């Protein structure tokens, strides 16, 4: 009992500290320590048996493991965004979009840009880095409150694309190994759910933005924003879109052979093509490279801090007990699977982690019961993209704080509505549709 209090109490404490603005490099290890102490984990490897779980090893394995796996993707993604910003390419594309779609649809343009890149296989973190400069320019020209930018980025990346049939994102591929399905499993239901999430989510985003504007909220410039006011000329908007297409194309071409490493090639191609196409518009390339590198370090450190917390949580006996309870939920296997994956994703702060932990336990049991593997695949995939976006989630912290420079207090209400509530409703709809035999 004390261990469960420690685990859920630590999670709640981390969420509270995150919402109050505490630095995650302090909050995450402190709350992980709280979890470890109440679960009786040894604090140091010297106090534990050989190979046994302990606070320090499990936290640092999670922390350093994430950096080792993702640093170069974060680095190239952040630099690509800064180069697009420095050359004026992001501003040029955003002005062209506003001219074609109108200022009232600036938020929709951000959502669609994220959706195209995500469905094309670009990592969620990289999409946020890449699209943010354009999103900032779009919101500035449309005079929309900038605190909604993270919500627009997340909505376009983590809802109707990330977990939909055919998506190359890992959240759609993990179930294949355990269920023997394909990336297009349950595509009919997936299409209906995706349309629902997109329409309902965009309506909700628009409503929140309009409500804020009616209260007098406007776009507020900051000293750290790129200054393009003095530019006499901007690059050609259509040519400025080519680097984004190159990133999308390279990631698609090399995805099967290189996996996530394809993003390094794709983003490097995007950086080089941006510089070559807009060479005469470059202002300060060395500063853009330096700012991008620093932004990547801050972003990945914040995310890794939360991943380390998840590493400690997963090593506790109470986590194993919670998994046993969640995977043994009676009733409809689709409901049990969706709840188990969502809750575990929330505890670990990772949608892929929720699936990877729950499916090895769920899949054999449910398949023996005769559950449709395609229905289970799509249901757990959609549900995995819900509670992983609680305030302490790695993607959440990176997007809100490190990329957009907002506070959780200002940005998370809209962010959570679109990246937690909307996917949860999508999962409920999927269960209903599969249950009636669609």
Image: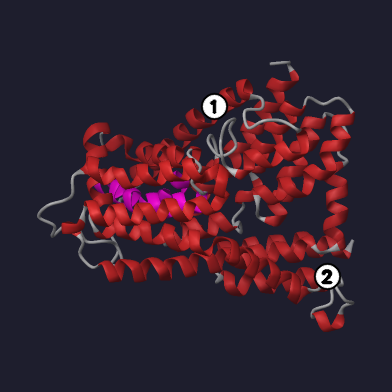
125 and 395: which is toward the camera: 125
**106 sits to left or right of 416:** left
In front of the other: label 1 or label 2? 2
Q: Position of residue 113 (x, y in %)?
A: 39, 40
In 3D space, how far apart are the residues under numbered discs 1 and 2 (Cα atoms)? 43 Å
Q: Position of residue 66 (x, y in %)?
A: 61, 63
Question: In the displayed structure, would residue 426 be above or below residue 148?
Answer: above
Question: In the displayed structure, would residue 352 be above or below residue 27?
Answer: above
359 and 223: which is toward the camera: 359
**370 sits to left or right of 264:** right
The residue drawn where x is 29% and y is 71% is 287
Magenta span contains residue 283: no
In magenta, the rendered stretch is 124-153
Q: Which residue is mark 1?
A: 196
Location of the N terminus (image quadrant): bottom right
Which numbered disc flags the more N-terminal residue, 1 or 2?
Answer: 2
- Estimate how packed mark 1 is, as few (under 14), some (14 to 19) or many (20 or more) residues with alpha carbons within 10 Å: some
Q: Secondary structure at mark 2?
A: loop
Mark number, residue 53: 2
Q: Position of residue 123 (x, y in %)?
A: 51, 49
Magenta span contains residue 138: yes
The residue drawn where x is 42% and y is 48% is 148
């Amino acid at each position: 009992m004390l261990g469960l209090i420690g685990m859920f109490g630590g999670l709640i404490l981390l969420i509270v500290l995150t919402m109050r603005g505490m630095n995650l490099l302090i909050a995450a290890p402190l709350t992980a320590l709280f979890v470890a102490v109440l679960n009786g984990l040894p604090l140091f490897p010297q106090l534990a048996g050989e190979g046994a779980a302990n606070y320090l090893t499990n936290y640092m394995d999670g922390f350093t493991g994430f950096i080792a796996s993702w640093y170069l993707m974060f680095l190239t993604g952040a630099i690509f965004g800064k180069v697009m910003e420095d050359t004026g390419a992001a501003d040029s594309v955003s002005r062209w979009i506003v001219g074609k779609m109108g200022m009232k649809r600036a938020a929709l343009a951000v959502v669609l840009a994220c959706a195209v890149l995500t469905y094309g296989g670009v990592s969620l973190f990289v999409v946020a880095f890449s699209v943010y400069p354009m999103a900032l320019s779009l919101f500035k020209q449309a005079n929309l409150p900038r605190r909604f930018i993270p919500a627009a980025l997340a909505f376009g990346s983590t809802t109707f694309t990330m977990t939909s049939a055919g998506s190359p994102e890992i959240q759609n591929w993990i179930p294949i190994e355990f269920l023997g399905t394909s990336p297009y499993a349950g595509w009919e239901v997936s299409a209906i759910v995706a349309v629902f999430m997109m329409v309902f989510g965009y309506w909700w985003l628009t409503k929140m933005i309009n409500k804020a504007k009616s209260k007098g909220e406007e776009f507020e410039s900051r000293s750290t924003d790129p200054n393009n006011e003095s530019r006499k000329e901007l690059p050609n908007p259509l040519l400025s879109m080519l680097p984004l297409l190159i990133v999308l194309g390279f990631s698609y071409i090399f995805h099967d052979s290189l996996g996530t490493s394809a993003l390094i090639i794709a983003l490097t191609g995007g950086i080089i093509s941006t510089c070559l196409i807009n060479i005469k518009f470059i202002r300060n390339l060395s500063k853009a490279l330096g700012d991008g590198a620093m932004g990547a370090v801050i972003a990945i450190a914040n995310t890794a801090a939360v991943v380390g917390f998840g590493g400690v949580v997963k090593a506790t006996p109470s986590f194993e007990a919670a998994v046993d309870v969640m995977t043994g939920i009676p009733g409809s296997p689709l409901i049990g699977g969706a709840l188990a994956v969502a809750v575990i994703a929330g505890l670990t702060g990772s949608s892929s982690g929720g699936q990877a932990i729950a499916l090895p336990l769920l899949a054999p049991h449910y398949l023996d019961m005769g559950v449709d593997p395609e229905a289970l695949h799509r249901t757990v995939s959609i549900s995995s993209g819900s509670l992983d976006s609680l305030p302490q989630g790695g993607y959440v912290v990176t997007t809100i704080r490190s990329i957009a420079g907002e506070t959780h207090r200002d940005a998370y209400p809209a962010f959570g509505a679109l990246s937690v509530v909307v996917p949860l409703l999508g999962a409920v709809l999927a269960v209903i549709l599969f249950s009636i035999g669609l």
